[in-house]
Structures are given as C-alpha cells and as structure tokens.
Image (cartoon, rainbow, N blue to C red):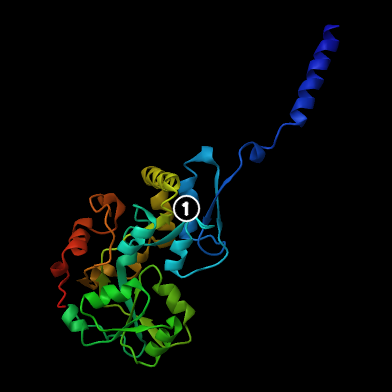
Amino acid sequence: MILLLLLWAFSIAVFAASFKLPEAEQSPATWVIYHGTERLDYTTELLQLALSYIPHKHYKVRGSGAYLPKERAIDELGHGLDVLTGTCLKERAEKAMPVHFPIFKGANGLRIALVHKSQPDKLKGRFNIRDLQTLHGGQVHSWSDTKILRSNGLRIFDGSDYEGLYLMLDKQRLDYFPRSILEIENDLAQHSTLDLAIDSHLLLQYPSAFYFFVSKDNPELAQDLLKGLEAARVDGRFDALFKQYYGDLLTRFGLSQRVHIPLYNPLLCDGVPWDREELWLFQPGILKNLASEKQNAGSVN
C-alpha cells in the first residue's frame, strides 16, 4: 500500500512538472529598443552590460531597425524608441533625460585631424587658436562640433554632404578635417582610395559628455541604467569593456607628444559630473573650466 502511494505521489509530481511554464514565460522580457540597426559594438555591449545588473526586470535589448537624424531620434524617444546615445547638449537635455555617466570618459572631445597625404606637416608649428585661424577646417553643418569650433574663432566650412568633405580634403580645398580619436581610424579606412593621412602634431580638446538618453517619461529606465553603469564601474567591467575597444588609443596616437589646444564648449548641458575624476580620462577640473569660462580656451572671438 505504501509503495502504491509513493508511486502515485511520484506520478503526480512528474505530471505537474510537465506543465511547468518555461522560464521566459514566467518572467516576460522587458525590451529596450536602441537607436539604429541590430549590432554589437561598444555602446550596445555597454547597454546590455548596464541592464544586466537589474536581473529581476529581465531587460533585453534590440535595435530599432533604422537610423534617424539625431534630433529627430530624440523626438521618437518614448514612441517605439527607448534609448539613444549622443553628446549632452543643452537643447537635447531639454527634450530628453540624460543619464549622467560619460560612457566614453570624455574621449569623444579629443579631436585630431585628417590632412592631405602630400602635406603631413600642415599643422606643424600651430600652437594656439590664432595659428589655426589662417587655415580652413571642415565639418558637417548640422554637427554640434561645427558650432563649437566656430565659437572658438576657427574658420570652418560647413558642408551638407559628409562624403563631400573627404573629397574636398582630397582635392586640397580644405586644410584639415577634425575627427574624434574614437572614429578617425575607421574614417580613414573607409576612404582609403583618397590621399588622406592622420595628422601627428595637434590635439584639439573640448569638454564633452557622451551619454545614454531616454524619454523624460521613463525615469525608471534612466535610474536602472545609471545604477547598472555605476555597478559596472565598481566591479571593473566598465573599464574592461572600454579598454577592449579603445584601450590603446592614447598611446597609438601619441597624444602626450602633441601640441594640446583646449577649446571652449558653449553647448554643453548642465549636470555633468566633473567632480568625479574616476569617470574621465583627463583632468576633469580643467575640462570644467573650459565648460564654464570662455576665456580659458584662448578664444579670440
């Protein structure tokens, strides 16, 4: 009799287990849609990493499937788009909620230039903004960089065609084309048929904070992202991911041997955590001064 009862209990347990809901059905995923196509790069890996520290919400990420101009994408936050990345500008912070954690450690504000291959020393001997004012740089007219460089008194041609700027430099109608250290090698590789080279003399720097942005109607996601980013910084996974993608840039470009020209940034949003030195590659105190005092940048506007 006892044996029969045990067999009956065992069969009931097996039967019940066979109807147990899969884990995914027990805890539905909370999807976070990021701007652009499905991809695995630094920002999407960091997004996944940060949200992994909030396991009970079962966050999963995927791309929106299309790229929109940045300002239009901001308007789409909360309407099928949950997260996008970008420099924290005053006007952007009015429309969307910035997560105040500089995901590139300020490196996106470090600019070196593409020059024509026949004139690798075009920028040699240029020690300040006045020296650069005799030259013509290039930028896309809609980029915030254009306004920043012009606010410092530099002569900038603002083209509407991104590819056209490379062609103008190739034809020596421009003297230089400043690009972030995070992207310049990729830019050069994509235009390998043109006679372009990376300048080895100058480093332009302006204060810049590249953030995750979310809808102002979704403060919970902003809080979770900040919590996850801070946790990843504490346990070292944030630094490890940054080094995996960008760890050798500072030595590869010889930044310490270049002439350093600091620039003022009049577009930077408020609330940037300059007081937290652990979040930045370079002295945040200096950058804070550049963010608030135009005269410190040596501008002659």
- Residue 22 lies, with reference to residue 13, above or below; the image says below
Q: Which residue is mark 1?
A: 47
Residue at figure coordinates x 37%, y 45% from the top left: 230
Residue furthest top as drawn: 1
Q: Nearer the viewer, residue 261 or 21?
A: 21
Residue at figure coordinates x 17%, y 70% from the top left: 297
Confirm whether residue 104 shows in the render.
Answer: no
Q: Nearer the viewer, residue 73 or 186?
A: 73
Q: Position of residue 163 (x, y in %)?
A: 45, 83
Task: Specify whether 60 is left or right of 154.
Answer: right
Q: Quadrant of residue 164?
A: bottom left
Q: Which three-letter amino acid code belongs to the residue tagged 1?
A: Leu
Q: Quadrant of residue 301?
A: bottom left
Task: Specify whether 297 is left or right of 28.
Answer: left
Residue at figure coordinates x 18%, y 78% from the top left: 129
- Residue 108 lies, with reference to residue 1, above or below; the image says below
Q: Position of residue 296 (x, y in %)?
A: 14, 67
The mark total stands at 1
Which corner quadrant holds the N terminus?
A: top right
